[in-house]
Image (cartoon, helix red, strand yellow):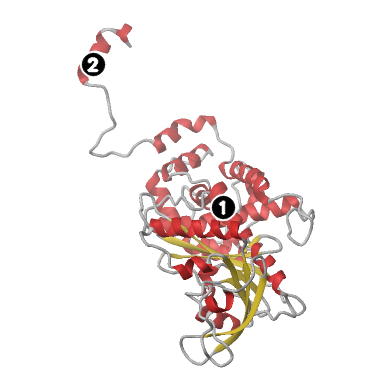
Amino acid sequence: MQKPLPVTDTKQTDPEFEALLEDLPPDLFELAYKCKAFVRARKIQSPAELMRLVLSYCGLDQSLREVGGSFTLRGGQKLCDESVKGRLLVCQGWIEALLKELMPQAPDLPQGRRWLVCDGSTVQAPGARRDDYRYHICIDLIRLRLVEVKVTDYKTGESLLQFSFLVGDVVITDRGFAYANQIVATQQRGVEIISRMSPHNLPLYNAEGRRINLYKELRRQLKETIQTLDARIKATAGNVEVNVRLHAYRLNDREAEKARQRLRKKSKRHERQPKAETLFFAGFVLVVTTLPPEDLPAKVVLELYRVRWQVEIMIKRLKSLLDLDALRARRNSPLAKLWLHGKLLYALLIERRTSKRVGRLLWTQLDNERKGTWWRVWKLISIEIKKAILGHWRSEQWEQCLEALAERPRKRKLQNLPSVVVTLLHRCPVLS
């Protein structure tokens, strides 16, 4: 194997970009050769410069032609968009390998637990009328950091089976994950669940094996009170059962009516009427858990579920600040998967740099008094990283840059003035 080249060439150093590369795994260049993303030096002289192209396309959302223009401005030879595309296409395996190493290593937890929150987010290709890809996201609820992220097509639904949990983990999810097979399989791995549920999607059974009629059990419950029911969940295949507790909190009249209005509005979009029983359950917060009450009382479970909203804030931050949902490539394009994974790499770089800048201040850990949120810090760090990726531009390279940005030959020419008008302008210079 060819010996890896240095981070930068000997003509000019770039300390800001070198510092950014230090936040990536130490075997960054070795992986580039191993994954055949970088084989030999041509116009792109090193794996470091190739990583710059990836981050420009995926992180900064430059077009292929803009990536080539930026490369040229940094002193490289003219690089056209087709050349950029060719170099990016071979980077998929490299970026996925780096992502695996960048994700925090799962710690040994003999005494404690990890508190995790899982959710999903969809991405649409340009011009699409439906979702094309899905991110499966798991965050550490204490440090509010990404723990695991997977990219699949849109047909792969949200599922607890997508994640690599450890024995002792506690996972908090929304009702989209509350299905019997998922909960049973996850609990068998030694993982505890706290999840909001829908009575229609998750049937509960009593000790005799009969299905519990939740409408009958809950209709006499007083408003703003909590009721706990012991129940069992059955997998659809086999005879595997899991003991759970259902904690039901009944909303007051004002909150219940708001929930029902949201339900009616959603049903109207799908041109259907909600059933009376569905409207009844909208007046409750139903949270099912495999944790026994002696570990977490009902009130604490419900309070903990509310903190699940932090994963929604994380996804909103990724979309608003980093444009996680603004896929540049078309659906099924080879560049689409690279962009999706490259955007995650960019997000993890910002997360690492943010932790480095904040240090031991415990800026936003949920087990301390929080000093602020990550929103403004991420925004400033993303500006800092953008400058490092773009690097120093050389003014004498602008002529070559414009050649890289020029349109390729095509049948449909760029619009010009009519030839008669051009002739008039030549005859009467005053008009121009």
Expressed as whole percent of the image width and height from the top left, the position of residue 222 reads 64, 69
Expressed as whole percent of the image width and height from the top left, the position of residue 395 reads 53, 30
Taking the image as shown, residue 288 lies to the left or right of residue 412, namely: right
Q: Amino acid at mark 2?
A: Val
Q: Amino acid at mark 1?
A: Lys
* Quadrant of the drawing holding the C terminus: top left
Residue at x-position 53% and y-position 76%: 215
Q: Helix, strand or loop at disc 2?
A: helix
Q: In the figure, 406 relative to 210: above or below?
A: above
In depth, the one of 290 and 162 nearer the eye is 290
In depth, the one of 218 and 160 nearer the eye is 218
Expressed as whole percent of the image width and height from the top left, the position of residue 352 reads 67, 55
Q: Helix, strand or loop at disc 1?
A: helix
Q: Earlier in the sequence, mark 2 or mark 1?
A: 1
Residue at x-position 54% and y-position 83%: 212
Q: Which residue is mark 1?
A: 316
Expressed as whole percent of the image width and height from the top left, the position of residue 384 reads 64, 43
Residue 100 is labelled as: none
Q: Which residue is mark 2?
A: 421
